[in-house]
Image (cartoon, rainbow, N blue to C red):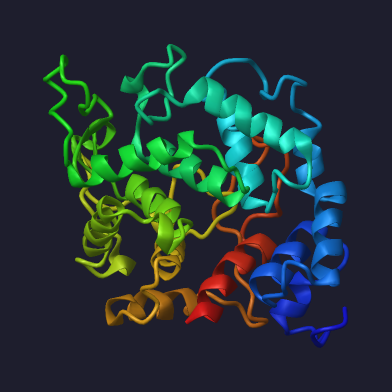
């Protein structure tokens, strides 16, 4: 470990330990900010793709590119194609490092993305299966892994329209060429699962996806969608997570449980990740959330795993309520950025 001290209470040194190549690669990339051509980063990236959890997940992939069974890949959660691709992206997988990653991404685009740009959760492949959390997660994941496919442009276009409502007819107008559906049922994250109210879990994924687009790719429509999304999330104190909800009396407790991996359930750390990624790190409305994130460090400057999916994914990522490298990586990205 050449670039930082190895003191016991140094969380960065902990993340850079050689025994965890997946975390180490992302820490070098995102916290040390090494150049993509830096020898140490190149070596770490290759090692992460050859020895870390990425390898264990890819070993479960069918040689045609899908996981578990062919088709759209939504079920079974959380090992099918959709969830495996989302997890691979969170682990830093890149289509440039392993042809199997590109094969799986291509399979997903071929079988899950509709001509209208909607990612579909239904086995039928109908656009009626679109839902914000899925749309945002997959746009983010594919962009994060370096997928360069013109079909993604349509996916981002639909996502922006679904937020702003521009050019999208109500779900009842079934003859309209572009309309809402039962799940993604209205502007600003309105969701049928959330009593037709805006779903903050889905909105976080959409903001995160937009944060991965370069300024050059942010069309006026996308910029408008970003602005409306940010104002929605900062319209209240994010620490309260008091966003619209259906019949639930209180916000879901998972908001305050930092976890890894992150699928459709969101935590408030992910709100910070999205807003910081969109350039709002200095917005005073974000200060309480940033203070809250920092307050959750333990005595060694690490964050605990509070929400996980034990036995439900191809790989487990640590013990619950114990210091966790993946959660600490997520939190340090935010803390360091501000």
Residue 247 point in image, percent of width and height: 20, 39
- Residue 73 seen in the figure: no
Task: Tally the numbered discs.
Answer: 0
Q: Residue at x 70, y 48 (%)?
A: 93
In the image, residue 63 sits, relative to residue 314, either above or below, namely above
- Image-based side of 237 in relation to 254, left or right: left
Snapshot quadrant of residue 68: top right
Front in this rendered view, residue 39 or 315: 39
In the image, residue 117 sits, relative to residue 218, either above or below, namely above
Residue 240 point in image, percent of width and height: 29, 65
- Image-based side of 116 in relation to 303, left or right: left
Front in this rendered view, residue 80 or 325: 80
Q: Residue at x 74, y 70 (%)?
A: 15
- Residue 277 seen in the figure: yes
- Image-based side of 262 in relation to 89, left or right: left
Which quadrant of the figure contains the N terminus? bottom right
In the picture as drawn, the residue positioned furthest to the top comes out as: 124
Snapshot quadrant of residue 121: top left
In the image, residue 287 sits, relative to residue 197, either above or below, namely below
Q: Residue at x 77, y 21 (%)?
A: 63
Residue 73 point in image, percent of width and height: 56, 23
Snapshot quadrant of residue 291: bottom left
Residue 59 point in image, percent of width and height: 81, 32
Q: Residue at x 71, y 54 (%)?
A: 318
């Amino acid at each position: 470990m050449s670039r930082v001290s190895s003191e016991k209470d140094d969380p960065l040194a902990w993340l850079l330990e050689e025994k965890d190549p997946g975390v180490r690669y992302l820490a070098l990339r995102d916290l040390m900010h090494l150049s993509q051509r830096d020898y140490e980063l190149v070596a770490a990236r290759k090692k992460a793709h050859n020895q870390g959890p990425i390898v264990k997940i890819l070993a479960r992939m069918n040689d045609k590119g899908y996981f578990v069974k062919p088709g759209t890949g939504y079920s079974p959660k959380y090992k099918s194609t959709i969830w495996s691709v989302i997890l691979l992206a969170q682990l830093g997988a890149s289509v440039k490092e392993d042809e199997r990653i590109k094969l799986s991404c291509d399979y997903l685009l071929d079988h899950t993305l509709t001509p209208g740009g909607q990612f579909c959760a239904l086995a039928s492949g109908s656009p009626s299966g679109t839902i914000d959390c899925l749309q945002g997660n997959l746009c983010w994941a594919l962009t994060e892994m370096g997928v360069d496919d013109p079909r993604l442009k349509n996916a981002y276009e639909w996502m922006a329209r679904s937020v702003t409502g521009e050019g999208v007819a109500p779900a009842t107008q079934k003859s309209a060429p572009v309309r809402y559906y039962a799940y993604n049922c209205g502007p600003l994250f309105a969701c049928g699962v959330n009593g037709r109210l805006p779903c903050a879990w889905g909105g976080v994924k959409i903001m995160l996806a937009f944060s991965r687009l370069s300024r050059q790719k942010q069309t006026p429509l996308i910029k408008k969608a970003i602005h409306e999304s940010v104002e929605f999330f900062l319209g209240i104190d994010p620490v309260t997570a008091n966003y619209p909800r259906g019949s639930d009396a209180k916000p879901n407790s998972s908001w305050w449980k930092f976890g890894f991996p992150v699928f459709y359930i969101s935590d408030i750390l992910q709100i910070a990740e999205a807003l910081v990624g969109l350039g709002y790190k200095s917005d005073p409305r974000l200060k309480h959330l940033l203070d809250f994130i920092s307050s959750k460090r333990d005595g060694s400057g690490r964050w605990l795993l509070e929400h996980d999916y034990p036995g439900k994914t191809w790989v487990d990522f640590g013990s619950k309520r114990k210091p966790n490298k993946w959660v600490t990586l997520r939190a340090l990205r935010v803390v360091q950025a501000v």
